[in-house]
Amino acid sequence: MTKTTLNQNKPRPHAKKTDGESAVLEKIAEMSEPDRVMAERLHDIIKAATPDLTPRLWYGMPAYAKDGKFICFFQNAHKFKTRYVTLGFSDKANLDEGNMWPSAFALKELTATEETRITVLVKKAVS
């Protein structure tokens, strides 16, 4: 290979890279109903509750990080062949309550009650 050929294969500095939020939104768009609708709503709830979290993919799932450390993530039911979607929290989430606390939640539907609870949980997780 000539030097010219090698340079043509190099990424260009101005080439647009997909940012974390775009990747998360693309992954959500690939989901089937009703997971997609729930994931879209969770994305909106998490971003509104904690705008300092950065959307990124984590093991191919929509997730949200603070200072490069993942705080919470969403697993869709269809991909994992479960009867519910999961909103999970990593060990970096500030949800400790004594010696035992939940780190994942099953969601079959998002009503105002669940949306309020998720908002409280996400805010606590990053506190």
Image: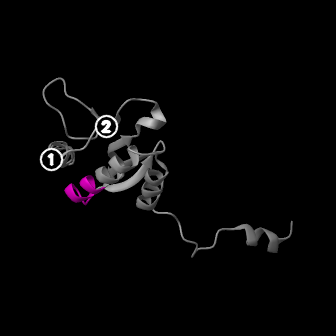
**Numbered circle sitting on residue 116:** 1
Q: Position of residue 47 (x, y in %)?
A: 27, 57
Q: Residue at x 16, y 23 (%)?
A: 99
Residue in front for this viewpoint, 35 or 49: 35
In magenta, the rendered stretch is 44-52
Residue in front for this viewpoint, 39 or 92: 39
Residue 80 shown left or right of residue 39 in the figure: right
User: Does the stretch in magenta take in 97?
Assistant: no
Secondary structure found at label 2: strand
Q: Hey, which residue is sitting farthest top in the picture?
A: 99
Label 2: how many Cα within 10 Å (few below 14, some 14–19, many 20+)? some
Q: Amino acid at mark 2?
A: Gly
Q: Residue at x 46, y 63 (%)?
A: 19
Placement of 39 over or under 1, stated as above or below: above
Secondary structure found at label 1: helix
Q: Hey, which residue is sitting farthest right in the picture?
A: 1
Q: Position of residue 31 (x, y in %)?
A: 46, 47
> How many numbered marks appear?
2
Residue in front for this viewpoint, 72 or 77: 77
Q: Amino acid at mark 1?
A: Thr
Residue 57 shown left or right of residue 120 in the figure: right
